Image (cartoon, rainbow, N blue to C red):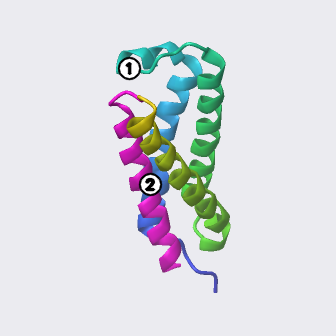
Amino acid sequence: MEKQMATGLKTTFLVHFIVALIFGLTLLLLPQAWTLVGFPVREVPPYRLVGAAMLGFAASSWLSYKATVWEKVRIVVQMEIVWTVLAALVFLWGVLFAALPVFGWVGFVLMVGFAAAFIVFYARS
């Protein structure tokens, strides 16, 4: 019998989908809006590229949310661990050493939270 996906992991995928969708759409369609939270938008294409990538992560989280079997989402969880840990490190470096605005801490906290959740569910599976 195939191992079922944990309910908490399903919830994590749903929350990740919503957060990635919001940030992804904003970055892709309204990159200049990030000036409102202190990010200097000098070049629009990099913001849109990150937005497109985040929408890809949102899509993978939505598809994973709809799945029921652990083996169908295992590789997505592994990818999310890599992405969220690296993103958290980039945000931390940015706020400490690269004059990233205070809102960078929001990104850091979100990424650490998602990383912790994905790591816990991966370790339990």
Q: What element carries label 1?
A: loop
Residue that badge 2 annotates: 114
Quadrant of residue 79 in the image? bottom right
Relative to 119, residue 13 above or below: above
Identified by mark 1, the residue type is Gly
How packed mark 1 is, by other alpha carbons closer than 10 Å (few <14, some 14-19, many 20 or more), is few
Quadrant where the image shows the N terminus: bottom right
Q: Mark 1 points at which residue?
A: 38
Residue occupying image coordinates x 50% and y 24%: 26
The residue range painted magenta reads 100-125
Q: Position of residue 45 (x, y in %)?
A: 66, 19
Q: Position of residue 112 (x, y in %)?
A: 41, 53
Residue 86, position in %: x, y? 55, 51
**Quarter location, residue 100:** top left
Which kind of residue does numbered mark 2 sit on?
Phe
Q: Which residue lies furthest to the front in this view?
A: 97
> Is disc 2 placed on a helix, strand or loop?
helix
Q: Nearer the viewer, mark 2 or mark 1?
A: 1
Residue 12 shown in magenta: no
Question: Which residue is most to the bottom?
Answer: 1
Main SS of the magenta part reads helix
Q: Are marks 2 and 1 in contact (CB under 8 Å)?
A: no
Residue 6 makes an appearance in the image: no
